Amino acid sequence: MRAVVEAAAFLELSPDEVLDPDFAVKELESMVYLLGQLSEDEKRQLVAFTRTEAERASSVDYREFLRQFPEAMGL
């Protein structure tokens, strides 16, 4: 789970100088599709994971990303 969330955070939070925005959007859309294939139990586990991680996050940007992750990913 952590790898998926970290990859999505990299795509979402990287500045345009580091990562092409069109590429980032395309990859995030692919992640949304693939995460949509998870079972309801797997989705619940991923949502719970992001909530727990958000409570621990020291970075404000990363914390906000984690809080928005479930809705943004269609979970």
Image (spheres, grey):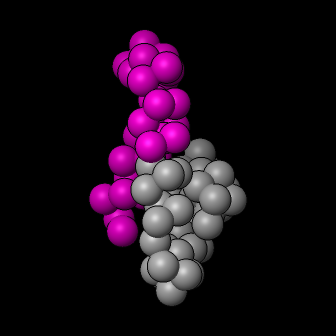
Question: Which residue of the protein is positioned furthest toward the bottom in this rendering?
Answer: 41
Q: As displayed, is residue 13 above or below residue 71?
A: above
- Position of the N terminus by quadrant: bottom left
Question: Which residue of the protein is positioned furthest toward the left in this rendering?
Answer: 3
Q: Which quadrant of the view contains residue 54?
A: bottom right
- At a point 48% along the width and 79% down the height, the residue shown is 39
- At a point 36% along the width and 47% down the height, the residue shown is 7
Q: As displayed, is residue 20 above or below residue 32?
A: above
Q: Is residue 71 left or right of residue 25?
A: right
Question: Which residue of the protein is positioned furthest toward the front in this rendering?
Answer: 37
Secondary structure mostly seen in magenta is helix
- Position of the C terminus by quadrant: bottom right
The image position of residue 18, as x and y in percent, is 38, 19
- At a point 53% along the width and 69% down the height, the residue shown is 50
For the magenta stretch, what is the residue range?
1-30
The image position of residue 33, as x and y in percent, is 50, 52
The image position of residue 67, as x and y in percent, is 65, 61
The one of 19 and 55 positioned closer to us in this rendering: 19
Q: Is residue 75 left or right of residue 25?
A: right
Query: Would residue 21 be seen by someone viewing this image from the given angle?
Result: yes
The image position of residue 57, as x and y in percent, is 51, 62
Count the labels in the image: 0
Q: Is residue 40 magenta?
A: no
The one of 48 and 75 positioned closer to us in this rendering: 75
Q: As displayed, is residue 15 above or below residue 8?
A: above
Query: Would residue 64 be seen by someone viewing this image from the given angle?
Result: no
- At a point 37% along the width and 57% down the height, the residue shown is 4
